Image (cartoon, grey):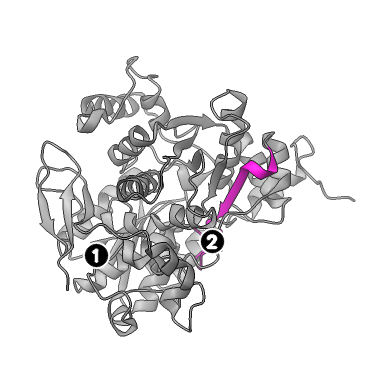
Amino acid sequence: MQGDAYLKCIDPQCGLEYPIENTNVQCEKGHLLDVKYKNKPSPKLKEVFYKRRDSENSIFNESGVWRFRDLLNFCQIDTENLEECSKYLVSLDGAEGRQSKPYRMSKAANFIDISNDNLWLQPEGYNPSGSFKDNGMATAVTHAKMIGAKKIVCASTGNTSASAGMFAANEGINCDVYIPAGQIAPGKLSQAYQFGAQIIEVDGNFDEALKQSLDDAQNHDGYTVNSINPFRIEGQKTIPFRALEYLNWEAPDWIVYPGGALGNTSSCGKALMELYEWGWIKKIPRIAVINSEGASTLSDLYNGKFENEELRWNKGNPNTGLISRYYDHLDKEGLRPKTKATAIQIGRPANILKGLRALEFTNGVATTVTDSEMLDGMSVVGLNGFDCEMASGASVAGIKKLINDGIIKKDEVVVGILTGRQKDAMIPVDYHKNPENKFAIPPKN
């Protein structure tokens, strides 16, 4: 093994480092951790990744995650040795990320009012469990397996539970899932049950469920696979890797994500920081995070809607007191995140600091859209023949809003990430039954 990978605290004033086998999700001072690599990968790997598209019967070349294994080699293996890959790397037969790439969708472009040539939408719902989570779960469970974990643990609004349950079942390890009771789409919850996960219902929202799951992981020999885990972030970096590869490593002007726990924002930021540092890209795309109006923590803080102060990463000196006061304000006023887009119904994003770092590095923006706007975004994607859930509609609606506001220019190239497929059957049914909705095709008698 090369001894190339290690963990490092994200706080520049702290900077504590740990061996790669460490299972803590924070340093001893309570700061989040990054997976870091000492060696700078050669741009010639771009050709290797392209050649691996002809998989030669290797599931690790088929995989849209492990095809890029040289850029996330925390197992420190010989990436060309397929026996070593089989020993260490966890994969659902190469299916994670395999079919995920950007597509043009003319009806969505027309709705947004942007040239079809300038808009790309990347459906992560083609992953085996139906969402982007499989990208990061492949790497998180790889690390869990590497350190000999017997049980993985997560909190979930739905998609994480489905992905964790699927990978755990495939690897023959136990899986505990903490869920906010009554707040998960049945289609997502049924997946977790189907894969044999142990469901623990929490009387509260996602934030309370996450708190209990982290306690389980710390005190009962569990291994947490939520995006607070830095190894999950590594797998999610491959979402922008695939988008950039498809665009011949010519960086777009914008990459747009729905905002939830901010793991995607964090992973995209880390990917872009690394690629730019390595000289793989010459331009840094701007990240846009689209919150639901009913779960608007990042947007509120970033845009100065609380105490008239704009929260920033500030080169590693964020005003964490402002975040704490905002959360205290939510508690005092009895405010809870509320949106039909349950995948992003999160009031205390676990990765808010990494998210701020990503926005600072990319000169990014954060905004909100309504449930109605997300439903329109979801529906117009469907009219292009692609499936996405309501939270994914935030990307479409957010791009439209940012263009209307003049923040995204019509001649800029935009990649929007559609994070998952539809698992709540009644959302599109109810949408189309109402003739008042923009894209409704109501049933005939």
Q: Is residue 122 magenta?
A: yes
Which amino acid does the dot numbered 2 rest on? Ser
Whether residue 43 is situated above or below residue 333 in the rendered picture:
below
| Quarter occupied by the N terminus | bottom left
Whether residue 370 is situated above or below residue 229 in the rendered picture:
above
Secondary structure found at label 2: loop
Query: Where is residue 436 drawn, in percent x and y?
Result: 77, 34
List the single residue furthest toward the front. Answer: 44
Instruction: State if disc 2 and disc 1 touch (CB < 8 Å).
Output: no
Secondary structure found at label 1: loop
Residue 47 horizontal side relative to residue 27, left or right: right
Residue 241 horizontal side relative to residue 144, left or right: right
Q: Which residue is mark 1?
A: 74
Residue 171 horizontal side relative to residue 105, left or right: left
Q: Is residue 81 magenta?
A: no
Q: Is residue 374 something one can see in this rendering?
A: yes
Identify the residue at image location x=35%, y=67%: 69
Magenta residues, start to end: 115-131
Q: Residues within 10 Å of mark 2 (few under 14, many from 20)?
A: many
